[in-house]
Each structure stands twice: as structure tokens, then as C-alpha cells.
Image (spheres, helix red, strand yellow):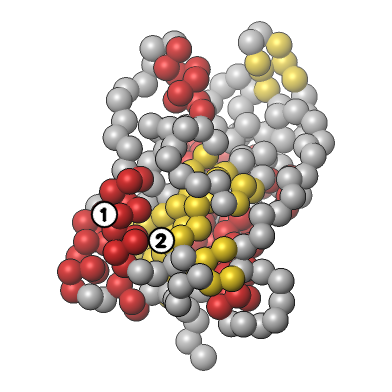
Amino acid sequence: MARPLLLDLFCCAGGAAGGYAAAGFDVIGVDIVDRPRYPYRFVRADALSFLDDLLARDTVHAFTLIHTSPPCQEGCALTQGTNRAMGWGREHTQLIPALRARLDRAGLPYVIEQPTGTAPVRKDVILCGEMFGLGVIRHRNFELGGWTVARPAHVAHRGRVRGWRHGVYHDGPYVAAYGAGGGKASIAEMQTAMGIDWTDVREELTEAIPPAYTEWLGRAFLAGSNRAGRPGATLSRAA
């Protein structure tokens, strides 16, 4: 049987895609920047325009599930906190409302992923690296459109994230997979901690989510859509 097809919008280097592929999906990724290390089929395009085209041509139903990781800078905790307080960074556009409107028009089950912060997403599922025994914390919020799954219990962290904080160095079992300097993780440490070995580009690694997150989500979705009688996702709208 053919594997279900997943559309991965704002795909970056494919952290989410790797998990969905492991769960049993074929994946097509879309990003406005060329991503030569993306390990699956890739289309360079503006994600919203690409989705508009699928809707206009009525071909979006070739996909079973749509995953989206829209730019997070407008609502993430780092932008809202340290960067804004220090006068760093620049203005960012919030794409989520326009994206959600298109996803609702598509009528397919979808996922919107965002980091902790003020982004306008429901926190239907919150995942953390410790839930999967990873070397990063990397909390991520997931809004599930058209399907549901029981939210897993958060697992207590085993210690701190390694690195400097306000002039004090802290050791710990997790690496800081963002930025550079201040005890942040090396590229090799980030690859190992997140389970991503197909890119060695720091910017791509710092923006990626661990594939373990979307493998869990993908397996839950497929368990529910297959009516396998196992605990997991429940579809509230036909895929």
C-alpha cells in the first residue's frame, strides 16, 4: 500500500519531516529558501502561495496531513524577552492567522508548530526533549486542526541546560541548541542531541525540531485514522 502523503510547509532542513517519514509518511517539503540538505522531495516556494495554488487547483486533497512550522520570531520567548529588552533583532510578521485560514479552507487535518512564547496557537500538545530521552529540552507547542490526541504528561527535567547564564556557568545534561557562544552546543553536539545527521548548518539545526516529536505525532495520527483500536489520535474530520 502507498504511504500517506504529508505536506511540510516552512520545512527548513527537515527536522519535522524526518519524524513523519519514520512514522510512515511520504513527505514533500516547501520552503522559501533553497534547502539542499532536505532529505525528501522539496519545492522552493513561498509556503502560503504554494498552499493557495493547491487550493485554487483543488489538488490539496492529494495530502493526508499538513504540517506547518511558520516563522516563530514574532512570538517566541527569546524575541519577546531578551532580544526585545536589549533592543536586538527586527520587526517580524505574524503569519499564523493567515495560515490557519488557508488550512481551514483546505479541510484537511493539520499541525501548526511553534516554540514557547506568545504566538497565537492552541497548545493542544506540548512536547519536550526529555519525553524522548534527548539531549535538548526544546519545548514545542502543537495546534492540531481536525484531529485530537491525548496530551502526554510532561516529564521532569534531569537538570539544567549547559552554558553561561548572567555571568554564571551551569553544567547539565542538556545542550543549548541555539545561538553561538556562551557555552552553546557545537554542531556535532546539536546533531547528536536532536537526532539529526543530514545537515551540519548551524542555522538549520538551531531552527529544527527533533524528529522524535513528529514521529510521535505521526504515529498517533495514523493509529487514529486507521481505527486500529489502539490509544492515540481521534479524527474529528475525515482525512
- Amino acid carrying label 1: it is Leu
Q: Position of residue 32 (x, y in %)?
A: 28, 50
Q: Residues within 10 Å of mark 2 (few under 14, many from 20)?
A: many
Q: Is residue 90 above or below residue 2?
A: above
Which residue is at 63% across, 31% downward? 176
Q: Is residue 101 above or below residue 170?
A: below
Spatial CA span between label 1 and label 2: 12 Å
Camera-side mark, 1 or 2: 1
Residue bearing mark 2: 8
Q: Nearer the viewer, residue 174 or 35?
A: 174
Q: Nearer the viewer, residue 119 or 198?
A: 119
Q: Residue furthest front?
A: 236
Badge 2 marks a residue whose secondary structure is strand
- Amino acid carrying label 2: it is Asp
Dividing the picture into quadrants, the one containing residue 86 is top left
Q: Position of residue 189 (x, y in %)?
A: 65, 40
Dividing the picture into quadrants, the one containing residue 38 is bottom left
Q: Is residue 35 above or below residue 74?
A: below
Q: Is residue 96 left or right of residue 177?
A: left
Q: Is residue 192 left or right of residue 44?
A: right
Which residue is at 57% across, 59% downward? 214
Dividing the picture into quadrants, the one containing residue 72 is top left
Quadrant (top left, top right, bottom left, bottom right) of the C terminus: bottom left
Q: Is residue 55 left or right of residue 64?
A: left
Which tag, 1 or 2, sits closer to the chain's start?
Answer: 2
How many discs appear? 2
Residue bearing mark 1: 48
Q: Is residue 222 left or right of residue 157?
A: left
Badge 1 marks a residue whose secondary structure is helix
